[in-house]
Amino acid sequence: MEFGLRRAQGPDAGTYGARAAVIAGCAGTSNVLCGELFDVPVMGTHAHSWIMSFDSEYEAFKTYAQLYPTACTLLVDTYDTLKSGVPNAIKTFEYMRDNGLPLDHIGIRLDSGDLAYLSKKARKMLDDAGFPQAKITASNDLDEHLILSLKMQGAAINSWGVGTHLITAKDNPSFGGVYKLAAIQMPDGTFTPKIKLSENTEKVTNPGNKKIVRVYEKQNHKIIGDIICLEEEHFSEDEPLLMFDPQETWKKTRLKPGEFELREIMVPIFLGGECVYTSPKTMDIRKYCLEEQETLWEESRRLANPHQVYIDLSQKLYDTKRQLLDEISNAQLG
């Protein structure tokens, strides 16, 4: 779950960042405005201040259960997680059961302390009390590495509330992308390729009006790589396909017909100055995103030393780039 509104760089970042997090795979967000604007699931719990505003922790829990019986997740670490919070949560669930309130969506949230240890202890307490369906949610400055560590420790945690590390670009706060001219459209509709030269290899642009073709292994529909090519180029699944690294050109892969599938992944947004694209609903984008994630190899999805997803240039685009570089070099040499 996305929990980062209060840590976002402004309200718009909080709302659109939450939308992006849901698209990328989060089950929902605590940002109710995002839920209203983009029709995404809103989920979460109450704050510590809710507990502290009552005379007792139990009264706070019971009141919350009465208000939200179909989404009753109780924050149990305001005072003492195992001696007060979890016992009072169990007492609240017993009250709900005795008064005919639904028990399908009950749970607790841990927000401090040793999450692995506390979750295991809380799980046993909930099970022993007859509430094995109660979910345990964890929060508190989580990131992918801490979550992986908790999973390896056998933490009894069902869902994760991630805030700061999800809504902010904490490890890379500036975006390094820049606009560069790639081609000029001539009066006859053709494109003249342009290139920017730089001392930094990664800043040398790829010229021309381009598109991207994604190559999948046919047997399991996993990504082999992407080919950046010129718009007028066409490839066939019925013909052999040669792929090569544009930096280390001796690294080549030749695919035979029947071994691969092709898909152009770019779609037009504007044509002739007119918008021709209708953005899908956020949850439909999320579904597409999750389906695309499944086309990545497991080795590419691991956190430590992930396998590279290859991005190659077509032979024609590579030759065009080399030709323009040679023309600039020859002109400089006189």
Image: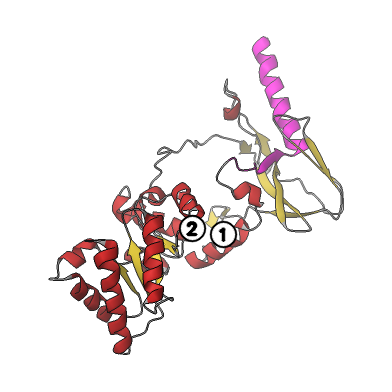
The quarter in which the N terminus is drawn is: bottom left
Please give the range of residues in magenta: 305-334
Quadrant of the rendered structure where residue 62 is? bottom left
Does the segment drawn in magenta span residue 315?
A: yes
Q: Residue 201: x and y, percent? A: 61, 25
Q: Which residue is mark 2?
A: 154
Q: Describe residue 152's horizontal placement relative to residue 246 as left or right.
A: left
Q: Describe residue 327's horizontal placement relative to residue 151 as left or right.
A: right
Q: Describe residue 228's horizontal placement relative to residue 43 as left or right.
A: right
Crowding at dot 1, Cα within 10 Å, few <14 / some 14-19 / many 20+, comes out as some
Main secondary structure type of the part rendered in magenta: helix
Nearer to us in this view, 50 or 117 = 117
Residue 46 in sight in this render: no
Q: Label 1, label 2: how many angstroms apart (C-alpha)?
A: 29 Å
Does the segment drawn in magenta span residue 33?
A: no
Asked which secondary structure carries label 1, the reply is helix
In this rendering, the answer to whether 58 lies above or below 326 is below
The quarter in which the C terminus is drawn is: top right
Q: Residue 232: x and y, percent? A: 74, 46
